[in-house]
Amino acid sequence: MWRSFSNWAKTKPLTLRLASALGRSRGRTRLLDRLLTPAPAPLKPDLTHWHQRKLAAVWIGHATVLLRVNGMNILTDPVLSGRIGLGLGLITAGPARHIAPGLRLHELPPIDLVLVSHAHFDHLDRPTLCRLNRHIPVITSEHNADLIRDLGFHQVSELRWGQSLRVSQLNITAQPVQHWGARYFLDQHRGFAAFVIEGGGRRVLYAGDTGYHQHFRGLGPVDLAIFGIGAYDPYLHAHANPEQVWAMADHARARHILPMHHSTFRLSHEPMDEPLARLRQAAGRSEDRLVIHQVGGMWHD
C-alpha cells in the first residue's frame, strides 16, 4: 500500500512539496509516537571502562553504533525515535521500532563526532538529531548538510567520495557505495557514502547502506567493518544480502565485522531473523570474526 502511494505521489507536484515540508519536521508534536512500546533491548552495555578502550563499539540499534576510536566517541546515523518517516502532526507516517535502543540519550557518553551516511529517514532522523548537543561536529555525505544545519548545529561538513577531513585525533574519509540518496522522491542530488575512520593506528569502516560492489577492494585492512545486512528483499540493488556483505568485508580485509541494519525496523519482506542467520552461515568456520549479534551488545579490541 505504501509503495503504491509513493509511486502515485512522485507524479504530483503538490504532494512532493508537502513531502519535503513534512520530511523536515523536528518531531516536537509527535505525541502519539510516545505511546509505542517496542520490546526492550536484549542486552545492556556496561560503559564503566568505556573511556579506557582504544577501539570499542556498542550496537544501539539499526544503523546507530556508538564507537570509541583513539579517545573519541563517534555516533553513526543516530536514530532513537520510536517511529521513522514523515511527520504528520501528532504521529509519524512510517515504520515503528521493534526493539528499543540499547542506550537512551542520557546514557550516552559525551559525543565528539556524529556521522550521517545519507538522508533516508532510517539514517537521518531529525527528531533524534534535535536532541543532541548542537556543538557536536557532524560529517555527512554531499548535499545533505541543509537537513542538519537548520537544526542549529554549528559545524556540519559534507564529504564527497574520496574526500577526507581531520577532526581532532581522527581522520574521516568518504568512500563510494551502491545506493541512492533522495529523501523526498525528487531530490536525487543528495549524496550517500561510507566512511573510513582512522586514528591511533586503528581503522574502522562504517559502510552505511550499500548494494554489492567492489569499491572496498584495496581499502583494507580494517580492524572493524560495520555493514548493513538487512532490507535486501526486494531491494537487492541497494541493500546487499548477507552473503554479499561477507564478500565485501573480505574485500576490505576486515578483522572483525559488526552486522547492523537488521531486527530494528521492518523495511522489507525477508523475515526479521533471516539476515543474521544467513550471515552466520556465510561466515562458516570464520564466525568468530562476527561481533555483536544483538541490540545493546558491546565489543572491544
Image: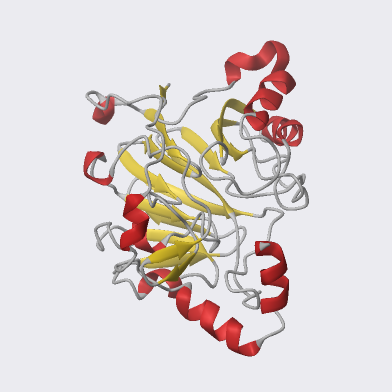
State the residue at coordinates (29%, 67%).
28
| x and y percentages locating residue 122 in the rendered image | 51, 54
Q: Quadrant of the C terminus?
A: top left
On screen, 301 above or below 123? above
Horizontal side of 155 relative to 94 (left or right) equals left
Q: Quadrant of the N terminus?
A: bottom right
Horizontal side of 14 relative to 281 (left or right) equals left
Toward which corner of the image does residue 190 lie, by quadrant? bottom right
| x and y percentages locating residue 108 in the rendered image | 26, 41
From the viewer's side, name the closer residue of 102 and 18.
18
**Coloration mode:** secondary structure
State the residue at coordinates (32%, 26%).
45
On screen, 81 above or below 247? below
Q: Residue furthest top?
A: 285
| x and y percentages locating residue 13 in the rendered image | 64, 89
Count of marks placed on residues: 0
State the residue at coordinates (71%, 30%).
246
Q: Residue furthest bottom?
A: 14
State the residue at coordinates (70%, 63%).
3
On screen, 228 above or below 185? above
From the viewer's side, name the closer residue of 94 and 225.
94
| x and y percentages locating residue 293 in the rendered image | 52, 24
On screen, 215 above or below 263? below
